[in-house]
Image (cartoon, grey):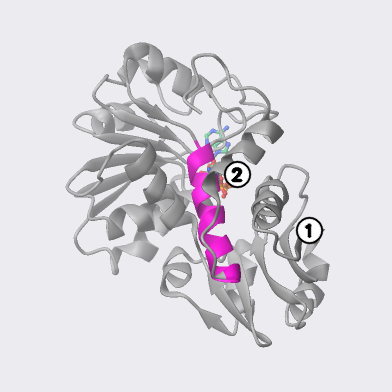
Amino acid sequence: MKYLGVIGHPLKQSLSPVIQQAALDHLRLDILYEAWATPDDGLATRFTGLRSPSVLGANVTIPHKEAALVAMDELDDVAQKVGAVNTIVNCDGRLRGYNTDPTGFLRALREDAGFDPSGCRVLVAGAGGAARAVVVALTEANAVSVTVINRTLPRATKLIDDLRSTSTGTVLTPLPDEPSSWADALDGCDLLVNCTSVGSAGSPEEKDSPVPVELLRPDILVYDLIYRPTETPLMSAARQLGCKVVGGLPMLIYQGAASFVLWTGREAPLAIMFDAARQALGPAPVSGEH
Ligand code: NAP
């Protein structure tokens, strides 16, 4: 028996054990995927444990993705660029860190929304860890411009400053979360990506939209990274206006599938992973896409 797990704190919201175990069982692999809830003061011991021959690797989630970056023996270029690790592979006792979020984001954009960001103008709401992965993905995919609006402007400015030197083909602009910023940035925008937690189930803002929805136009693709609920207030409002909409579930599955390939060398059974996630999330609303 070999082991995998997700490292985070707390972990009760993580869908990774459900989707990864379903995939492992489907392929009859003798691997157990566990939830490894790890507070800050247990992180060093946890990383040491990953070097054991019985451990194939791990996922890393909030709040340890940045701490994992500095604990690795080797780093993949994408993880380095994002500044965070979400997947660790144990290579004979050496830990190699990856970040599969940009791959998952782009795959969902291309395959589920049928949208190629090359040459497009994009507005990103939020400047946290997910936004960093999304901006890296969009610059790698040759978006012509990416504007980042965040409640805390210095965080957006730092994100852009960190990525500007490696994103030469894309114009990157941070803006404050003010009505005039939204109006300017949505004017001529092709794609809006919500990378804030506003609208997520159980949060104080679960009934809110991070974006003034009256400024949306039907030709904007609206992509909300939130997967719980499967239909956020932003998604519902955008759908009613006639926008094409994609939620966070496909990205969640595709980033997990990319991790699965890194650990097992096997193609991930996507349909099985989608089914397991949908079952764990409960029934989708009637108007929902996923
Ligand atoms: P994070 O690092 O904590 O960042 C949270 C972001 O939300 C920050 O930009 C924060 O702004 C903003 N925010 C929080 N409350 C707000 C409010 N009341 N008003 C305006 N902005 C607010 O979290 P993260 O890791 O980036 O995750 C963000 C979301 O993406 C979460 O809902 C997460 O579940 C989702 N996600 C989905 C996937 C997927 O695979 N589908 C992957 C990763 C993340 P400040 O900087 O001002 O605090």
Give the percent coordinates (x, y) of residue 35.
78, 56
**Residue 114 visible in the picture:** yes
Q: In the picture shown, does residue 121 fall above or below 67?
A: above
Q: Is residue 190 magenta?
A: no
**What is the crowding at mark 1: few (fewer than 14 residues within 10 Å), some, or many (at least 20)?**
some
The mark found on residue 237 in the picture is none
Q: In the picture shown, does residue 277 fall above or below 118?
A: above
The answer to whether 84 appears left or right of 220 in the picture is right
Looking at the image, tell me whether mark 2 or mark 1 is earlier in sequence order: 1
* Image quarter for ligand 1: top right
Q: Please report the residue visible at 47 percent of the width from the left and 17 percent of the height from the top.
A: 236
Tell whether circle 2 marks a residue whose Cβ is less than 8 angstroms from ligand 1: no
Helix, strand or loop for the magenta stretch, by majority: helix
Residue stretch rendered in magenta on the structure: 248-264
Kindly identify which residue carries mark 2.
272
**Residue 175 visible in the picture:** no
Q: Quadrant of the N terminus?
A: bottom right
| Mark 2 element type | helix
Q: In the picture shown, does residue 110 fall above or below 289?
A: below
Q: In the picture shown, does residue 109 fall above or below 16?
A: above
- Counting the numbered discs, the total is 2
Q: Is residue 257 magenta?
A: yes
For the residue marked with disc 1, what is the amino acid? Glu
Give the percent coordinates (x, y) of residue 217.
27, 20
Q: Please report the residue visible at 65 percent of the width from the left and 61 percent of the height from the top.
A: 60
The answer to whether 218 appears left or right of 25 in the picture is left
The mark found on residue 34 in the picture is 1
For the residue marked with disc 2, what is the amino acid? Ile
